[in-house]
Amino acid sequence: MKVYKFLTILSKISVMKILVFIICGILVILNYGCSDINSDANKSFNARLAVSGDSSDPFYGKKLCHNSKYKCIKIYKKDTWENLFKDKNTRQLVMDLNRTNMPLKYRDWIIIPKDINNSHILYSPFPQKVSKTNKKKIVISISKQAYAAYDSKGNLLRWGAANTGAEDGERNTPLGKFKIYRKKGATCQSSKYPIPKGGSPMPYCIFFHKGYAIHAFKMPGFPVSLGCVRVGNDDAKWLHQFSPIGIDVIVEA
């Protein structure tokens, strides 16, 4: 009799496990989860701990934490760009707002737009329209840590993150109005760095002044380079196609 009761209980447990498995499967399909692994990523952004501004923080945008268009949220250890922002366009917008293309494990907080469904171009830190010049131009802003590309009619076509030179007096990105004088493709490399033989990758490099160039590279989210302007890989490709030799590159403070 005791053996029969034990078997009956065991069969019920097995049935329960099957039911739990089926329910979990349905929830996964519906984009939920039954595991507590990275459960923070499933919380709404409004439920996340908000962070406040800190002028000593090196990352771009802490002052935007108090802007009506944005919110700054805490990042947890298991967070990734992909699990927080499954839509590629949304993910790119948030990365651009934070001026970075590096993994989230390096961050404790990020800026997010309060209306995440708005168009990328609407979050540009640059004007949508500038004076007509009858030629294309690229604008680099050191304070905004971003670039803007304008057509010949003065319309903003694209903007994105851009990390400029480390501000130590020696590696600052030069200010002024320059012209593109040389370009190379995906295999572009530095002839100087690392010293003494060079070879550091500078994909889709666009030289605008002496050895200074716009090119693809890692961006932590603050001025960091040896003077060049770092942008994301897709932006570097786009700018390379957009920019004929001779167009203006304007670097602003």
Image (cartoon, grey):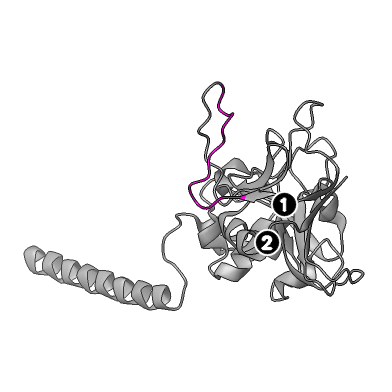
Q: What residue type is labelled 2?
A: Pro
**Residue 187 inside the magenta-drawn segment:** yes
Choose between 191 and 59: the one closer to the eye.
191
Q: Are marks 1 and 2 in contact (CB under 8 Å)?
A: yes
Give the left or right position of residue 178, taking residue 19 as reference.
right
- Residue in the picture at 81% in, 38% down: 174
- Residue designated by label 2: 244
Residue at 60% across, 48% down: 205
Q: Earlier in the sequence, mark 1 or mark 2?
A: 1
Q: What stretch is highlighted in magenta?
A: 183-195
Q: How far apart are marks 1 and 2 (CA)?
A: 8 Å
Q: Where is residue 149 in the image (x, y as percent from the top left)?
A: 75, 63
| Residue type for callout 1 | Ile
Residue sticking out furthest to the top: 196
Between 215 and 71, the residue placed more toward the observer is 215
Q: In which quarter of the image is residue 22?
A: bottom left
Q: Quadrant of the C terminus?
A: top right
Task: Choose top left, top right, bottom left or bottom right for residue 25.
Answer: bottom left
Residue at (58, 44) in percent of width and height: 218
Determine if residue 91 is in view: yes
The residue beneath circle 1 is 180
Verify whether residue 50 appears in magenta: no
* Residue 194 x, y percent position in the rendering: 55, 27
Q: Is mark 1 on a helix, strand or loop?
A: loop
For image coordinates 75% across by 56% down, the residue present is 147
